[in-house]
Image (tube, rainbow, N blue to C red):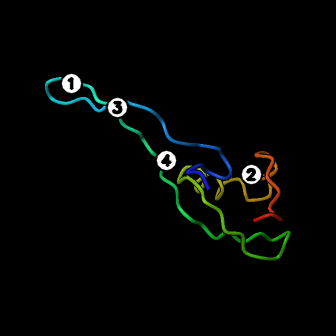
Amino acid sequence: MSRQCALTGKKANNAFAISHSHRRTKKLQEVNLQWKRVWWPQGNRWVRLRLSTKAIKTLNFKGIDAFALEAGINLNKF
């Protein structure tokens, strides 16, 4: 499984690490992903998702049904 948010699709970003002498080396900025168990009332069960912290905050605001519908995700597969 790739390091990608299940709902938002966020993934790693290529960037430069810049030293004090301004020497630039490549680095990878990973997404802050967390395994989260979310109660899905429509399916009457827990769903385990790998979400970014931004998605967790949005999930608390929108709800899992609306967020999954917007992302085009079928929660029966999780």
Instruction: Name the amino acid type tagged 4.
Output: Val
- Pair 3/2: label in front: 3
Specify which label sits upstream in the sequence, 4 or 2: 4
Q: Which residue is mark 2?
A: 67
Q: Secondary structure at mark 1?
A: loop
Inter-mark Cα distance, 3 to 1: 10 Å
Q: In x, y percent, where is residue 17?
A: 29, 33
- Pair 4/1: label in front: 1
Q: Residue at x 14, y 24 (%)?
A: 21
Q: Secondary structure at mark 3?
A: strand
Q: Are marks 2 and 1 in contact (CB under 8 Å)?
A: no
The furthest residue to the left: 21
Viewer-closest of 67 and 32: 32
Q: Which residue is mark 1?
A: 23
Specify which label sits upstream in the sequence, 3 or 2: 3
- Quarter of the image where the C terminus is located: bottom right
Specify which label sits upstream in the sequence, 4 or 1: 1
Specify which label sits upstream in the sequence, 2 or 1: 1
The numbered dot on residue 78 is none
Q: Are marks 3 and 1 in contact (CB under 8 Å)?
A: no
Q: Which residue is mark 3?
A: 26
Hey, which quadrant is residue 30 in on the image? top left
Q: Which residue is mark 4?
A: 31
